[in-house]
Amino acid sequence: MQENAILEHLQRIEKQLEIINSKLDNFMGFEELSEEELKELDDIEAEMEMGEKFPLE
C-alpha cells in the first residue's frame, strides 16, 4: 500500500517537472539566452532525466 502512495507521488512530481520543462522551452526570451545559459539548462535537463538532483539556487 505504501509503495503505491510513493509511486503516485513520484508520478505527480514527474508530471510537474514535465510542465516546468515545457514552460522553460516556451519562456519568452528563451531564444535570447547566451550559449552558456543554454548549456546550463541542457545540463540540468540531462541531470533530471538521469534522476540526479540539482540545487534550486
Image: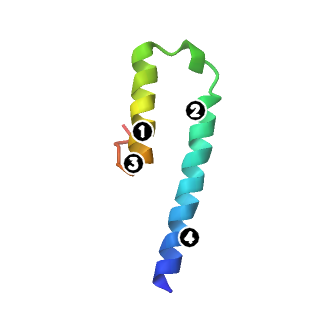
Q: Which mark is residue 50?
A: 3
Q: Earlier in the sequence, mark 3 or mark 4?
A: 4
Name which of mark 1 and mark 2 comes first in the sequence.
Answer: 2
Q: Nearer the viewer, mark 3 or mark 4?
A: 3
- Determine crowd level at label 2: few under 14, some 14-19, many 20+ residues with C-alpha closer than 10 A: few
Report how far apart the C-alphas of labels 3 and 1 lie in the structure. 6 Å
In the rendered image, which residue does mark 2 sit on? 24
Question: Which numbered marker is on residue 1?
Answer: none
Residue shown at the point (46%, 22%) measured from the top left: 38
Q: Please state if 52 lies on the left or on the right of 23 as rendered.
A: left
Contact, mark 3 vs mark 1 (Cβ under 8 Å): yes
Q: Amino acid at mark 1?
A: Ala
Q: Secondary structure at mark 4?
A: helix
Give how far apart the Cα atoms at labels 1 and 2 are.
14 Å
Whether residue 22 sits left or right of residue 47 in the image: it is: right
Q: Position of residue 12 (x, y in %)?
A: 58, 61
Indicate the position of residue 21 as horizontal and vertical percent values. Answer: 57, 39
Q: Amino acid at mark 2?
A: Leu
Q: Quadrant of residue 20?
A: top right
The mark closer to the camera, 1 or 4, is: 1
Vertical comparison of 36 with 47: above or below = above
- Is the residue under label 4 in contact with that under label 2 (CB below 8 Å)? no
What residue is disc 4 on? 8
Instruction: Determine the secondary structure under disc 1.
Output: helix
Mark 4 Cα within 10 Å, few/some/many (few <14, many 20+)? few
Q: Is disc 2 placed on a helix, strand or loop?
A: helix
Question: Upstream in the sequence, badge 2 or badge 3?
Answer: 2
What residue does disc 1 label? Answer: 46
Residue type marked 3: Met
